[in-house]
Image: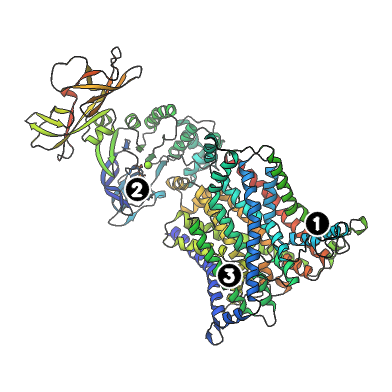
Amino acid sequence: MTEVKVTNLSKSFGSFKAVKNLSFQVSRQEVVCLLGPSGCGKSTLLRCIAGLEIPDGGTIEIGGEEVFNGDSGLNIPTESRNLGMVFQSYAIWPHMTVFDNVAYGLKVRRSSKNEISDRVQKALKTVKLEGFEKRFPSQLSGGQQQRVVLARCLAYSPRLLLLDEPLANLDARLRDEMRFELREIHEKTRTTMVYVTHDQGEAMAISDRIIVMNEGTIIQIGTPHQIFEEPSHPFVARFMGDNNVLEGFVSVFDSCTVAVDVPGLGSVRCRGPASRPGSASISIRSKHIVLSQKRPDGENTFKGIVSRSVYLGDSIEYSVLVGETSLRVKSLNTSIRFMPGEDVWVQLNIENLRCFLEGSDGKG
Amino acid sequence: MERVNSKNIIWTLTVAAVLIINVYPLFWLLWGSFTGPEGFTLKYYAELFNKADFGRMFKNTWVYALGSTLLALAIGIPMAIAVTRTNMPFKNFIRLGSTIAFVSPPWLNAMAYIFLFSPNSGFVNVFTDKYLGFKILNIYSMTGMVLVSGLFLYSYVFITVSGYLESIDSSYEEASVVSGASKLSTILRITIPLARPSIVTATIFSLIMSWGMFATPAILGIPVKIYVFATEIYMLLNSFPPKIELSAVVAVIFSALAIFIWFLSSKLSRSEDIGKYVTIGGKGGKKIEIDLGPYRFLMAGGGILLIFSALIMPYLIVLLMSLSKTWFFELSWNNLTLANYHYVLFELSNLWIYLKNTLVLAVTVSLGVIVIGTVVSYIKVRTRIKYRRHLEIAAMYTIIVPASAFVIGIIWTWIKPPLVLYGTLWLIFLGQMSRSLPFGVRNCSDGFQQIDVSLEEAARACGSTWRKIMTSVTLPLMKYILLGTFVLTFLSSARDLLTPLFLAAGSAKTMTLSVAIYYLWGETRIGESTALSIMLILLTLIIYLPLQKVLERSTDLDD
Ligand SMILES: Nc1ncnc2c1ncn2[C@@H]1O[C@H](COP(=O)(O)OP(=O)(O)O)[C@@H](O)[C@H]1O
Ligand SMILES: [Mg+2]
């Protein structure tokens, strides 16, 4: 069942188009991440759903009910959309105790005293903050403040929870911990969530589906596994980290393979049919590149020179210069270490290469 | 829909109030200076320029304003740097003393310095005449006026510059010290250039404030016929028949000059924000402390001497004057008396009216300023309403119009039908509102800017309406800023002499304590006048001190 339905949404600031004609849906009880580099319009999109920004056009439905329609001019104000929202800056009211912060949404909804206190207790229990009711926000740590904000939204059981980079202000260790807790909280409450982040690890850990955005448009929608393993666009491959993306053009093609000429590297053979020559990008994960001292058998072997070698304990990271192209290589075999200046052979296994042809809508 | 309407009604009323209080009088001021019975005319301008003493008055005004400003800068800037960036001892004492000096009645110092330096009976002059054979200073002179005004204006410079320095990070200076620069060159090359915007602002506003200052040049200058802009206007209004057209001309000339200078300075400091640094206070983390070595005691000595001569000594002297039988205090127990207080309390007719007027004005003006200030700055900071920038300018520009010029506009506006307010407290209320509104708008804007907008958005997302957000989130978070604004406006209204004096129309019904003090002084009833001054100070202290405690505690809580 669909909880959020965004259709052809756009939003400009002056002449700058922050969100360009976006459409997507979020199912009930689903956690969906909006993932993309900073400045790509994620927050703007989220704030449009919340009603804090008024879009220029398109429609937004929440729970089957239209809350915004650019054509008819319908715009249900934020306070009537029955949402919860978590801000990057927490936005805990400093002049209210934890109890009052969490109770706010219930008081606004004119719940009875007993109900308020029951629900506040329950929400605080969900976020593991029992016993903190009388504290003021300034007496809490960053992680605890984050929990208060979550409890504040959960207390009145909104139909949709919007989170804008909620973990960005926490230190790395706490952030990892909170990822799992957010997931746990979702297991308990089953609230539909739209979650904005620029951190791919966070998106992978938390979401059922990821929407990758760039420059105000959606690049790919899919499960974390799909996004990671089958990026549909070089941008996604690049953004999901750890990928080497090489630009070239198709020189030879047949029904099942293509040869892509990468300037400064050479010709690389990839899977995938191509119907015509044209530009193409190739991506390969750094852990999939194989280094060896002697020339290996098979296709796609290149001679290079190690320019950097960093020992990381469980792996070794190299930069290898092949012609003019620098490749990032991650070797899990720590028993052999190449040193800078050493000659190595590089093999790009055809099984691990993804090829994106220009002009075929990013689909490789 | 009901919600949208209530918002719109508040907006409309506020815009109307700002226009009536701040903009409308300017129009009538111009009207008054350019029209005669026969319509448009320049004859009053011609009359003024042909007046024999106009040139002298013009020159006096500049000498007085520039002299006071330079003195204030020479004292205020080094003290501000010493207090915010060095290890000088007694910082808090100097800071507190300067703040109190800034909110003290401006005529106090003039009275005290007359006691010390009046040519024939001044305490110091008599003393040096007797033992050294010469008199140090005749306080009834341009030098005396500059000295006394500078000793007041420094507090404004100090507060502006130190507040600014406190709000900016001292990592620039730390970087300079780390890279091996000496203390002095760090101060000269880093601190002073950093403080430049606030120094430019302090200079311009000191100039404009000294054009508006009335009490000091009136008490020290009028007896020896040294007229500056504000006293000239007063004389024109009080001549018979009142030369109200000429006073409008003088007011227009000086307003135009002030606005011109301000434009020039905003180009200099590249800041068009009217009165950007007029707020009092400012928060800061830990700041670098440049080690002054043994000079820190010298600096502290200077600071203590300054607080003594600008604040403590004048207060003590005025207290002594109020307690002495003869005009000028003699060092003997026999000379002490409470008669002046007895007179003021029990024989001065209308005391209770003056007191009531003072309090009514102070309370209503303070309330008016925080209400209008809150709405105007809310519109400015939080909405996208089309002409919000214009509204802000309309509410703030009076800060660059000399006080004594603007009251003339107010007289012109309300002296004739349809609405004659001349001679009522309303007129003084309107005058003080226009004077204090810029401070209110500035303080409240700072407040709204400090409150992250997501605090309000979070409340909306929780389902709260605009009204509920205002009362449950925004205004509670603003309460210390509102309280601080209330206190400052209250104090400046209670000690204001110029507005009630110019607008009271000489009627006891609209006189305030400050006007009564000025009239008593004019009648050479020194003891009674100083006794009433002391009572006014006590009154303000009773209100100020408890609130000051609350305000201090609130800034502790924030961190
Ligand atoms: N209120 C605004 N006025 C003007 N530009 C804005 C405003 N809000 C966001 N933008 C611009 O829109 C773009 C997208 O912003 P945002 O949605 O905050 O990005 P993200 O959250 O993905 O980092 C940015 O380039 C930003 O500068
Ligand atoms: Mg963002």
The mark tally for this picture is: 3
Q: Name which residue type carries label 2.
A: Cys
Of all chains, the one bearing label 3 is B
Tag 3 residue: B254
Q: Name which residue type carries label 3.
A: Phe
Viewport quadrant of the N terminus of chain B = bottom left
Sooner in the amino-acid sequence: mark 3 or mark 1: 3
- The CB of the residue at mark 3 lies under 8 Å from ligand 1: no
Q: Name which residue type carries label 1.
A: Ile
Q: Is residue B44 left or right of residue B387?
A: right
Of all chains, the one bearing label 2 is A
Q: Does B8 sit above or below residue A231?
A: below
Are dots 1 and 2 on a single chain? no
Q: Which mark is residue B474?
A: none
Residue B552 lies, in percent from the top left, at 64, 45
Residue B83 lies, in percent from the top left, at 64, 44
Q: Are marks 1 and 2 in contact (CB under 8 Å)?
A: no
Tag 1 residue: B317
Q: Are marks 3 and 2 in contact (CB under 8 Å)?
A: no
Q: Which mark is residue A48?
A: 2
Residue A109 in view, yes or no: no
Residue B217 lies, in percent from the top left, at 70, 66
Q: For the residue labelled by badge 1, is the local secondary structure a helix, a strand or a loop?
A: helix
Q: Which of the two marks, 1 or 2, is nearer to us in this view?
A: 1
Looking at this view, is A206 or A123 the one in front?
A206
Residue B388 lies, in percent from the top left, at 45, 60
For image coordinates 54% across by 87% down, the residue present is B38
The quadrant holding residue A360 is top left
Are dots 3 and 1 on a single chain? yes
Q: For the residue labelled by badge 3, is the local secondary structure a helix, a strand or a loop?
A: helix
